[in-house]
Image: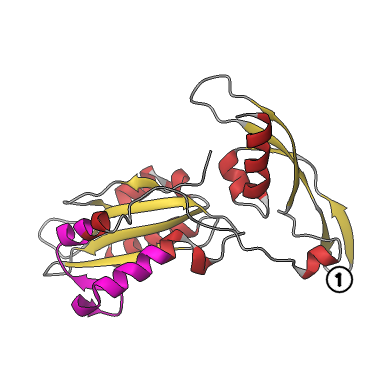
Amino acid sequence: MNNNFKQLLPFSRVGVELKDWLENHKDKLKNQRIFYILKAEMEEDDVYKIGLSERGGNSAYGRLNDYYHFYGKTKKNTCYGCKLHLVLANTWNPDVDNSDAKVRRIETNMKAAFKSKIKRGTERFAVSIDELFEYMLDKNLLETKEIEKPVRRTPRLKEKGEATQDAVKAIITHVLPKTRRGDIKFEVEFHKSRIYDSNQNSKMVQMPNKTLTYDELVGMRNGKQLVDKYIDKYIF
């Protein structure tokens, strides 16, 4: 198992209507880091925008939905609307800094390569969609192999015997899926965490165990490292 890149929207030369695609893939965007290419209908020439969303939760959906609120939905003989041409994603891992995330490295590479063709800002390029895609293929930017490395750090909370509420302590056991397409579920134990009431009084609390999928664990502190070790030892 891994946290490799997924092509939520494989390269599309003609593009797909932003809002329609977004509503059909809302669940798949949850807790994902994404890289995307899109084009507003109001652009007269070949001007494509690249971008990313680096946070977890519903940030990826919110980021793309912002374009819909700005450009609207495509209407015949108008400049309304926006088309998506590519969406790459992997699960947001809080143990990987944004600067080391693959989406950031792809964006940085594209900005440098097409610097001479910037139309506005630093993310809109006056270049054909074929040229963008051919460059990504040539530089293996669509490669799905996992290359993100977690940051090794000893936070102050850990030194105090505390942790954030999503910090995984151990993988207790697992349950295999009933069907081949199902997900393996893992019983997870968490570190104790400090919580505060409305008067800012604090106490240490043991979070209850949860049963989570691999992708859900990747989005938690220490989750990926611990679940990968568990899988190597007990499943594969």
- The image quarter containing residue 35 is bottom left
Find out whether residue 118 is within the magenta segment. Answer: yes
Task: Note whether residue 50 is visible.
Answer: yes
Find out whether residue 76 is within the magenta segment. Answer: no
| Image location of residue 81, percent across then percent down | 23, 60
Looking at the rendered structure, the secondary structure element under dot 1 is loop
What residue did someone put label 1 on? 199
Residue at screen point 64% across, 49% down = 225
| Image location of residue 3, percent across then percent down | 51, 46
- The image quarter containing residue 139 is bottom left
In the image: residue 125, left or right of residue 153? left
Which quarter of the rendered picture does the C terminus lie within? top right
In the image: residue 176, left or right of residue 49? right
Residue at screen point 48% across, 54% down = 147
Task: Note whether residue 66 is visible.
Answer: no
Residue stretch in magenta:
105-134
| Image location of residue 11, percent across then percent down | 25, 49
- Vertical side of 231 occupied by 194: above or below: below
- Choose between 55 and 184: the one closer to the eye: 184
